[in-house]
Structures are given as structure tokens and as C-alpha cells.
Image (spheres, rainbow, N blue to C red):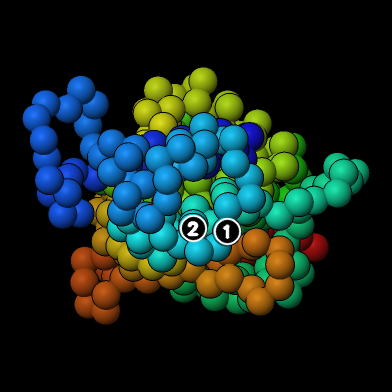
Amino acid sequence: MGTNSELGEFLRVRRAALQPQDVGVLNYGFRRVPGLRREELAMLAGVSTTYYTRLEQGLSTNASEAVIGAIARALNLDAAERAHLFNLARPVKTRRRAPAKPDKIRAGTLRLIQSMSGTPAIVLGRRSEVLGWNTLGHRLLAGHLDYTAPAAPSTRPNMTRMLFLDQHTRELYVRWPEEARRAVASLRLVAGKSSDDQELASLIGELSLGSGEFATLWAKHPVENCMSGLKYMQHPEVGYLELNFEVLTPPDESGHRVLMYAAEPGSPGAEALQLLHDTTEGVSAVHRVQRT
């Protein structure tokens, strides 16, 4: 993932998405390509066309905060997209280092989610790999997989990989296109902060080759910080569920995310979730035996 090429791609995609009328630019005649011209975007940002062109071509790596901020305003970027642009334009230089050790869930975090027997919960690493889950989270999202799979890096599921390459996971989400875009947008945000992450680059390469849908979405360069919302599921055991989700991030620099689900009280989703919980109690006992 070359940061300079990523910057150019992001600028081109966002520029193409803007129509002249969106930003008060007069439209003169036929346009061979969609969106704003480079000179129009440069004018809106208050920089020269030559300088902006160098940014799109990845030839300038020392743009000031004022220039990047002006371009972000000209492109009408939201907060997450703006932060992503800054990450691409001014990447943190890192020293050459030894390969990172496999990520691991904190014991306290695992105990916490396992204590929430009535709330589906999973812990994700930076690349959306599952570091741990409680029994109800496992049953809700991946009951077809071994409960102990997150314990070892070699068998650890990855939620983005499953979404695009695992048929069970694909069938779980009623609004799969919406879920897919959200997953790619989140992964783009991570990629903008991790230009030297070889494991992440490998995952993106695998998904790009294995899924045309992923490759198409990735090329559109969506960016979103998905911290809460709704998920619509058709579960093979308990049927249709509408669930709220919330993402909590620990105050350290691990990049871990605790993802929890809940249904509106009294809703059909709450009844379905309760049914899944009731049928999970015996399974939980087996998992407790496995851990001892």
C-alpha cells in the first residue's frame, strides 16, 4: 500500500464524485470525465493547478496542514474522510522493525465479554480479525465455526474476509451491500493509518483477488468510522433480527474494538435474541469445560 499512490487515488475518486453545481462552479460545456476538473478543485482550495496535480500524482509529500485542510474543505469531506486525507498526505514515518508478534486479546477484556451472557459481544483486532467472543456472540455471528478458533492466529476468523468470502456470513446479513460498504469503509480508515502493515496489505490483496465486489468497493475509496448503527440479520436458527450495535475502543493503542449487539426491548428481535440465548446456555457450559 504505497501512501503516495493511495493519496492520489483518494483525491481523484473524491474529485470525480463532486459535480460543479455542488460547489458553486459554473459548468461550461461537455465534460469528458465526471466530476470537477483539477483546475477547478485547485481554484476552490486556493492552490495552483500544478501543485494540486503533483499531489494527485503522488509527487509531493510535504504539503502543509493549511493546504490539506483547504483541499478537504474543497472536497466537502466529513470528519472521518478529512482525518483519512491527513493520514495519507502526512504519513507517520516509522523505523524498520522486526515483524510484529501475533495480536492477543487482554485477559481482562475476554473475562468482561464472557461475563455478559445475555449480550452478544466480540473483540476485533485492527484488521477486523476476531480476537475473542462470548458464546452468544459466537452463536449469533459464526456458529458454523469452532468456538475456539480466535485463540490461535492460524485459525482466527476475520470478519471482513468472512463477509466477502464466506457464504454463511453473506446470507446472515439481509442488507449485505450496506454491510459490505461499511466494512470496506472501516478497512480503508485503518489502511490510511498503517501504510507499512504487511498483514493488512496481504488481506486487501486476498480480498481484491477473491471478490470482485470487494475490489469494486475498494476502488471507490469509501471512508467511514462506524461506531454504532443497525444490523439486519436472518439467522439460521432464530430468524429475523434487527439489532443495534455499539463499538467501544480501549484507551490504549492496541486498535482493538469491542463490538456489542442489543435489540429494542419487546421487539421481535429481542425475542429472537432471547431464544438464541436460552439455547446457548448448554453450549456455554461446554465452553467453560473446554477452557479449564
For residue 20, side relative to residue 246 (left or right): left
Counting from the top left corner in percent of width and height, residue 124 is at 60, 57
The secondary element bearing badge 1 is classed as loop
For residue 26, side relative to residue 84 (left or right): left
Badge 2 amino acid = Val
Along the viewing direction, whichever of 199 and 111 lies nearer the viewer: 199
Q: Which residue is mark 2?
A: 67
Q: Which residue is mark 1?
A: 64
Counting from the top left corner in percent of width and height, residue 117 is at 53, 72
Q: Quadrant of the C terminus?
A: bottom right
Along the viewing direction, whichever of 280 and 74 lies nearer the viewer: 74
Q: Are marks 2 and 1 in contact (CB under 8 Å)?
A: yes
* Residue neighbourhood size for the residue with mark 2, other residues' Cα within 10 Å, grouped as few (<14), some (14–19), many (≥20): some
Residue at the right extreme of this rendering: 98
Counting from the top left corner in percent of width and height, residue 106 is at 75, 67
Along the viewing direction, whichever of 48 and 117 lies nearer the viewer: 48
Along the viewing direction, whichever of 269 and 274 lies nearer the viewer: 269
Image: 242 above or below 155:
below
The secondary element bearing badge 2 is classed as helix
Counting from the top left corner in percent of width and height, residue 256 is at 64, 62
How many numbered marks are there?
A: 2
* Residue neighbourhood size for the residue with mark 1, other residues' Cα within 10 Å, grouped as few (<14), some (14–19), many (≥20): few
Who's the residue at 50% across and 46% down the image?
188
Badge 1 amino acid = Ser
Image: 230 above or below 58:
below
**Would you identify the image quadrant in which residue 86 lies?**
bottom right
Q: Which mark is residue 274?
A: none
Viewer can see residue 74: yes
Viewer can see residue 155: no
Q: Quadrant of the N terminus?
A: top right
Who's the residue at 72% across and 37% down the image?
198
